[in-house]
Image (spheres, helix red, strand yellow):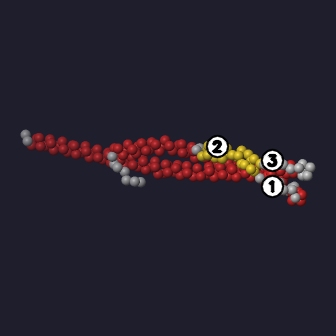
Amino acid sequence: MSKIKLTKGELKSQRDALKQYQRYLPTLQLKKQQLQVEILKHLALLEEKEHYEDLKRKAAEAWAGLLTESGVDIRQWISPKNIVTSSKNVAGADVPVFERAEFNEAQYDLFLMPLWVDHAIEALRQVVSLNREIEVIKKGTEILRHELRITAQRVNLFEKVKIPEAETAIRLIKIYIGDQLANSVGRSKIAKKKIGQLAEASL
């Protein structure tokens, strides 16, 4: 705690600061709670999407061998050309939201390609889309965790440092001013007594 001035002006400054800290602290605590809730939602969504992606991937493995056997290369049609995301504001943090993965149109000769290729492309696009969505959810979770760390530090700063420091300063200044006032009253009484004594002596 830095050295404080034991003056009425400093007392007012410390009281004003304390009011500001006490007014701002509940806002920070609410923000901390909102971030914690949102992180839990993100983690639940992440678990759901990872499970769904795992199911889709395992289902694709059952017929994936057909791709290598037939020599059909569909990679160009299952690589996203664009990932579309939006953004939502969570307690002051901008968090990305996955909207969709966009793919190039699959153009091939329907007579030359096996019938199952359409299904294969669609199924693998779903796996790839889920994979990209998982990446966006993870990124959003990291942003929220970073914001939570900063907010938690501020809450601790206010609760454990700033508010106790201001309260201590106010108490010390009030004690000092009270002592000064008592001393002043004491000196005044002594001075009055001396004046009285001098007045009596001169009679």
**Circle 2 SS class:** strand
Rate crowding at label 3 as few (under 14), some (14 to 19) or many (20 or more) other CA atoms within 10 Å.
few
Residue closer to the observer: 128 or 180: 128
Q: CA distance from mark 1 to mark 3?
A: 12 Å
Residue 55 locus on image (x, y percent): 80, 52
Residue 165 locus on image (x, y percent): 43, 50
Q: Looking at numbered disc 1 in the image, what kind of residue is underneath it? A: Arg
Front label number (2 vs 3): 3
Q: CA distance from mark 1 to mark 2?
A: 32 Å
Rate crowding at label 2 as few (under 14), some (14 to 19) or many (20 or more) other CA atoms within 10 Å.
few
**Circle 1 SS class:** helix
Read off the residue under disc 1.
75
**Residue 175 in sight:** no
Read off the residue under disc 2.
88
Read off the residue under disc 3.
105
Q: Residue at x 87, y 58 (%)?
A: 71
Residue 41 locus on image (x, y percent): 67, 46
Rate crowding at label 1 as few (under 14), some (14 to 19) or many (20 or more) other CA atoms within 10 Å.
few
Front label number (1 vs 2): 1
Residue sticking out furthest to the left: 203
Q: Residue at x 89, y 59 (%)?
A: 69
Q: Looking at numbered disc 2 in the image, what kind of residue is underneath it? A: Lys
Sequence-wise first label, 2 or 3: 2
**Residue 39 in sight:** yes
Residue 51 locus on image (x, y percent): 76, 52
Q: CA distance from mark 2 to mark 3?
A: 30 Å
Residue 100, placed above or below residue 1: above
